[in-house]
Image (spheres, grey):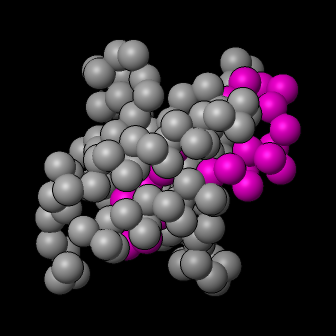
Amino acid sequence: MPSGGLLAVSSVTSSIAAAIERAQASGVLDHILVTREDGLPIAHNLSDVKQARRLAAMAAAIVGTGELAAKDLGCGTLRGASMDAEAGLLVCMRAGPQAIVAGLASPDANVGLLLLVIRKLTESVDTAIGDS
């Protein structure tokens, strides 16, 4: 797909939905969302569509801002960004050039396992999009 092209959501959602189910089976993630880099949701397991739209926009903003900060600070390529809040953890990672994965977990989640699961999910999402 050409750089900057729009992702055809219908062609990849079943593969991404299966990857989300596998990631959720790990037991470390409460909610998972995959969004386009422009903040439009591709797939998620949230029960509230409005919340999914807000999270998609925030994840895109977090990753985009993090990438700019990493570049400006000379830290290399951003691998992910996380937020540790009183009621939970949010981790956002780029999944190839067109997508972002956001994972929400409880505050007492195993962070190492959380990162491992999200990284594996980003690989699956990137593969699904690349194969479309």
Q: Pick the residue in front: 38 or 129.
A: 129
| Rendered residue at 15%/72% (across/down) | 5
Q: How many marks?
A: 0
| Rendered residue at 29%/47% (across/down) | 13
Task: Relative to 17, say whether 67 is above or below.
Answer: below
> Where is residue 38 drawn, in percent x and y?
26, 55
Q: Pick the residue in front: 64 or 8.
A: 8
Q: Quadrant of the C terminus?
A: bottom left
**For residue 119: magenta?**
no
Asked whether residue 129 appears in the rendered view, the answer is yes
Range covered by the magenta-colored residues: 95-118
> Where is residue 18 drawn, in percent x and y?
45, 44
Task: Relative to 48, say whether 17 is above or below.
Answer: below
> Where is residue 8 drawn, in percent x and y?
15, 58
**For residue 100: magenta?**
yes
Q: Pick the residue in front: 23 or 84.
A: 23
Quarter location, residue 85: top right
Would you say 91 lies left or right of 124 here?
right
Q: Quadrant of the N terminus?
A: bottom left
Would you say 45 lies left or right of 87 here?
left
> Where is residue 64 drawn, in percent x and y?
42, 61
| Rendered residue at 36%/22% (across/down) | 51
Asked whether residue 103 appears in the rendered view, the answer is no
Quarter location, residue 91: top right
